[in-house]
Image (cartoon, grey):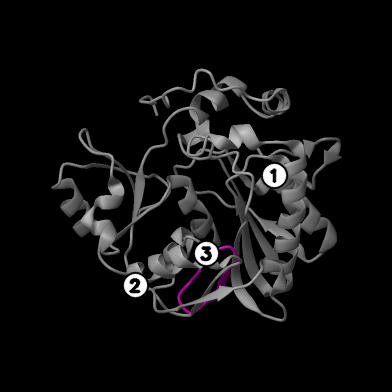
Amino acid sequence: MDNLEPIPSTENIEFKKGFIERYTALTDWEQFKKYSLCFLRRSIRVNTLRTSIAEVKKSIEAKGWKLEQIPWCKEGFWVSNPERKDVGNLLEHKVGKVYVQEAASMIPPLVLQPKPGDIVLDMCASPGSKTTQMAAMMENTGVLIANDYKGLRLQSLGINLQRAGLINSVITLMHGKRFYGYQFDKILVDAPCSGTGTIRKSLKTIRIWNAGMITKLAKHQKELLENAFNNLKPGGEIVYSTCSVEPEEDEGVVNYLLKKFPEADIVKVKLPGLKTSPPVMEFSGEKYDSRIKNSLRIWPQDNDTEGFFVCKIIKKV
């Protein structure tokens, strides 16, 4: 985390006044800005459906790449090479032995913990990083519904699932709020969001950010999470996650669900090696349910990753 590489030509980037005010109140603004304007470390996850961790580590290191273990995911590694940056051109990636996946993106499936034989819904699945990770955790058994709502997004999803060797998955094209009458063991709602945790991967987020957009997205996210809860069997679990660090899209959405469903509760989780920050418990004049303190809020500066929010929800029997 000491080898930050600034993104060229970012010294003239202007943040909107409202953005600066908001994030100054939420976190250490200078640290958030510093990490958001530096390159994101490249990382991979070994696909244990195709190979072993030891085999892949040996073959990639033999090509001059350095692998550094991601503390919270035994299959995950940061990768670097003094002469190359094209991780996606590795043969191991092309044949599905590894998946190029951001380190923080590996967290939601690890929190959900799908087991072999489970019936699982990945409500917003494309491009398939978390879907393929869950399939490996399920040992390619059970049923894994990989859903997305835009036809074009299914192209990359289908290719990635095929390359990873999934045989327990079904791809569906549907808006997440259209699922009705199902009884899933576990559901991942990795919701479409503003992406304010991923500025370092997409600088345009700074330019397009506005408070109205956040309000609109939060409404959509509440619909997705509510419908997911309605399709969860009693005793089942949901992980709600975003790569946003906006309270309205994160703690605010979970708070909405807790207020609407008395049978909803939050499961406290902790991943060894993962640094987290306190969740936001009050924002814009609204106090959130005290149970939200058990959510995971991850700022880019916490682990030198993307920013993420992850919350595990159970439907009480």
Q: Quadrant of the N terminus?
A: top left
Compare residues 209 and 233 and report the one nearer the observer. Answer: 209
Q: Position of residue 298 (x, y in %)?
A: 56, 40
Q: Which residue is mark 1?
A: 293
Name the disc covering residue 152, or none: 3
Label 1 environment density (alpha carbons within 10 Å; few <14, some 14–19, many ≥20): some
Label 3 environment density (alpha carbons within 10 Å; few <14, some 14–19, many ≥20): few
Q: Quick one: SS at disc 3?
A: helix
Give the quarter of the image for residue 248.
Answer: top right
Q: Which residue is mark 2?
A: 165
Residue 46 in view:
yes
Q: Quick one: SS at disc 1?
A: helix
> Between marks 2 and 1, how big is the CA–CA gap?
38 Å
Bounds of the magenta segment: 114-124
Q: Quadrant of the C terminus?
A: bottom right
Sequence-first disc among 3 and 1: 3
Residue 134 in view:
no
Q: Of the residues shown, which amino acid type is indicated by label 2?
A: Gly
